[in-house]
Amino acid sequence: MSLLERVPVREQKPEDRAKNFDEVCYGYNEDEARKEAERCLGCKKAKCVEGCPVGVDIPGFIEKLKQGCPVEAYQIISQYSALPAVCGRVCPQESQCEARCVRGKKGGPVSIGKLERFAADYAREHGIHPQKTAESNGKKIAVIGSGPAGLTCAGDLARMGYEVTIFEALHEAGGVLVYGIPEFRLPKERVVKAEIENVESLGVSIEKNVIVGKSITIDELLTEKGFSAVFIGSGAGLPKFMGIPGEAAKGVFSANEYLTRNNLMKAFHEDYDTPIISGRKAAVVGGGNVAMDAARTALRLGAEVHIVYRRSEAELPARVEEVHHAREEGIIFDLLTNPTKILTDEDGQVTGLECIRMELGEPDESGRRRPREIPGSEFIMEVDTVIMSLGTSPNPLLSFTTEGLEVNRWKCIVADEQNGATSKEGVFAGGDAVTGAATVILAMGAGKAAAKGIDQYLKEK
């Protein structure tokens, strides 16, 4: 095989995986990983590292894979990333590290994400864990939320010698990794649970079923519980809706609720009693990764599924890989289409989605061409389930119960991008609670920045 070509990665066949929740991508074996690693040029000034939000030494770990040393590759990665097996699966490498890969100028870029996944999976399968690097300094840090930002911040602080406690509102740790991303993309027991246990092995404690802002406040953590600083990584779990007629009908879900029922509460599993409406024909409104996850989940639960998106395919914000997988599995894309009303029967059950065709005009503030309605193009799509995937915003509970914590007009916490510092002394924040819904790796980058900010703040205090 030419060095210009990527080593193909093995996957379940579309016709098989559309009927199960097993992981779609099998990943590389040791021989495949070594062959792919040999495509890396080992650039001295590696552009790929600049594209990684957590700054992984990519040429360093790939060099170890070339040498046939996957454990050493993992040890390099784990110095930078608390969740390498997660990142190798769900991070948009094609627009980050791999987009900067010099090899990609002629041929395909090195499959950095697949190599990271291989190293992390190999380490897990062989009982290898990250190493703690500092003795305890006796200072306590509270982390709110056990999603990507919280786990990363906690892991980095533990490595620095801090005593870290994560407070998680749900009964399972992992945040969006357990409630938002489906099993077929990110296995919970085999991958997520193991990554969380690695963070705990650094000395991090996780307290579940604790709603900060209700069970206890941030001020109480700082004044009564002896914590020297607090990091808020509570994510953005409050769903957005369109505000069109019929959104309160039976059979209308937010993607957040639909995925939580299925992923965290195991509605797809026959041993669980979690109620969920699979539907006969479902419309998923939106075009991001969450929309793809919801659509592919509904498909596996037995529905014919349509993605309804008001722009064209070129503007789809979802990863190219996720769109490709969705199409392979039989998801139908109704592009340049926008819902205007949800139709119901006399019992309030969804019977259809009234839509209008769209066309693209001039670019808006995001740089994407603004969609506009085509007069007279209205039509009705017969569906019995509608899943709204229009983004999420942070739950306002923390800002309501924490005096002096500044938020912006979108109710996101205002925090310094460089160090996570908020308007309230000793309180830091990062991830979706600050930016609104974004990617796992960007949240991790924010958690890493905040860990450094907290360390600097306490050393200068």
Image (cartoon, rainbow, N blue to C red):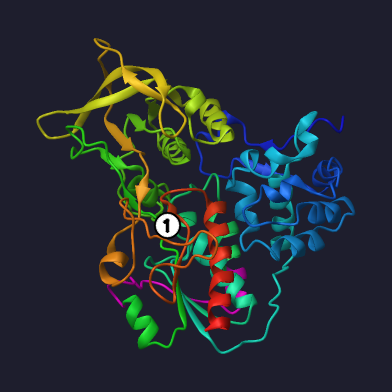
Magenta stretch: includes residue 208? yes
**Residue 360 inside the magenta-drawn segment:** no
Spot occupied by residue 216 in the image (x, y as percentages of width and height): 31, 78
Amino acid bearing label 1: Val
Q: Quadrant of residue 352?
A: top left
Please state if 355 lies on the left or on the right of 13 as rendered.
Answer: left
Seen in the picture, residue 50 relative to 6 is either above or below; the reply is: below
Q: Residue at x 85, y 56 (%)?
A: 64
254 shown above or below 351: below
Name the one closer to the observer, 211 or 19. Answer: 211
Q: Which secondary structure lies at badge 1?
A: helix
Tell me residue 364's x, y (percent).
Answer: 40, 29
Q: Is residue 458 left or right of residue 357?
A: right
- Pick whichever, 427 or 316, lies toward us: 427
The answer to whether residue 279 shows anywhere in this view is yes
Query: What span is in magenta?
Result: 197-216
Most extreme residue toward the left is 346
Where residue 283 sits, quadrant-wise, is top left
Which residue bears the numbered disc 1? 434
**Image point (64%, 57%), residue name:** 54
Q: Quadrant of the N terminus?
A: top right
Residue 257: x %, y % from top left: 33, 48
Going 30% across and 49% down the picture, which residue do you hit?
275
Dominant secondary structure, magenta? loop
Vertical order, 49 against 194 (above or below) = above
Kindly give the residue lying farthest to the right in the view shown. 67
Q: Position of residue 436 (x, y in %)?
A: 41, 51
